[in-house]
């Protein structure tokens, strides 16, 4: 059910030059809380092919400095009116803004995640069902009064334990790449739009001819309640890249959809 969740890599937003004097959270992909500020972004999502399966996700963060922030993220999922349910993951991320110009932004990021925390009919942190992932990456972009363009790249290593680097488990040990781009358009003080594309690729294990990675596409519309609160609705689509290089949407029929509430305080 994790694939139907709105990905956390689209959860945080950038401050436009027009709002430089206040801490604005409005759905942009480069947002970072100011020192002493908390933020929360809560997302509820499902899929048109299985509307009985629902995921509730939370990303909660704090600005240690204007240029340094920490966040935690987690999600819960259920299906068929709680006949099946799970605590999907628990993770933490650290973001350092190394360039914070009027227009150009650049962040260095690192994170750690555990999942599945508590699977359906499985015990807490079940040794045969839980993965541990470390990630490192960069994100950056260009900000104007009306629009933001951003890009990011992440390297992800997963295994069956948190610190068993170099001890390849034939089932869990994987190296993966993720990269993507996003655009945010501020249409007015109230409305803004988001378009994003993310690519995920496992570099080893299961890297057979029919598993060449996949794209997640997102289209969103945000409404600002005020400068520190917004609500958004999102539509997502997953496409696989076949061995011959063509994109195939038939393996993931339907669309993911969801809503999000964000607040800076």
Image (cartoon, helix red, strand yellow):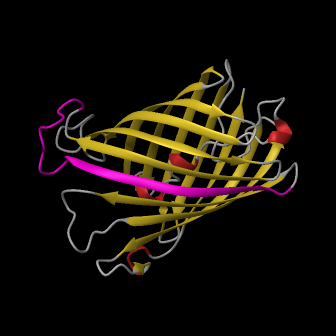
**Would you say residue 77 sits in the magenta stretch?**
no
Q: Is residue 117 left or right of residue 71?
A: left
When the figure is inspected, residue 63 is found, relative to residue 208, above or below; the finding is above
Q: Is residue 125 visible?
A: yes
When the figure is inspected, residue 243 is found, relative to residue 84, above or below; the finding is below
Q: Which residues are magenta?
A: 162-187
Query: The N terminus appears in which quarter of the rendering?
Result: bottom left
Q: What residue is shown at x 73% (from left), y 39% (from top)?
A: 25
When the figure is inspected, residue 203 is found, relative to residue 157, above or below; the finding is below
- Residue 82: give x, y in percent of width and height: 42, 51
Q: Is residue 39 left or right of residue 46?
A: right
Q: Is residue 200 left or right of residue 257?
A: left
Quadrant in which residue 251 is drawn: bottom left
When the figure is inspected, residue 155 is found, relative to residue 245, above or below; the finding is above
- Residue 45: give x, y in percent of width and height: 55, 55
Q: What residue is shown at x 66% (from left), y 39% (from top)?
A: 31
- Residue 89: give x, y in percent of width and height: 38, 40
């Amino acid at each position: 059910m994790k694939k139907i969740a709105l990905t956390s890599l689209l959860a945080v937003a950038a401050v436009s030059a027009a709002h430089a004097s206040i801490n604005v959270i409005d759905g942009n992909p480069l947002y970072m809380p100011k020192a002493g500020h908390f933020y929360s972004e809560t997302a509820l999502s499902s899929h048109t092919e299985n509307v009985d399966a629902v995921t509730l996700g939370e990303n909660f963060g704090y600005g240690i400095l204007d240029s340094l922030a920490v966040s935690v993220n987690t999600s819960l999922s259920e299906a068929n009116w709680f006949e099946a349910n799970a605590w999907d993951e628990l993770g933490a991320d650290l973001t350092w803004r190394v360039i914070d110009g009027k227009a150009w932004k650049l962040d260095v990021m690192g994170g750690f995640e555990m999942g599945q925390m508590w699977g359906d009919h499985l015990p807490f942190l079940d040794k045969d069902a839980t993965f541990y992932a470390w990630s490192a990456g960069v994100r950056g972009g260009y900000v104007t009064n009306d629009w933001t363009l951003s890009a990011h790249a992440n390297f992800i290593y997963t295994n069956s334990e948190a610190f068993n680097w170099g001890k390849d488990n034939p089932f869990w040990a994987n190296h993966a790449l993720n990269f993507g781009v996003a655009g945010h358009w501020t249409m007015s003080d109230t409305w803004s739009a988001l378009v994003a594309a993310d690519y995920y690729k496992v570099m080893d294990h299961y890297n057979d001819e029919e598993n060449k990675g996949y794209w997640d596409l997102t289209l969103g519309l945000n409404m600002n309640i005020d400068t520190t609160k917004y609500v958004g609705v999102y539509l997502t689509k997953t496409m696989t890249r076949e061995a011959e290089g063509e994109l195939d949407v038939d393996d993931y029929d339907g669309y993911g959809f969801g809503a999000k509430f964000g607040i800076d305080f």
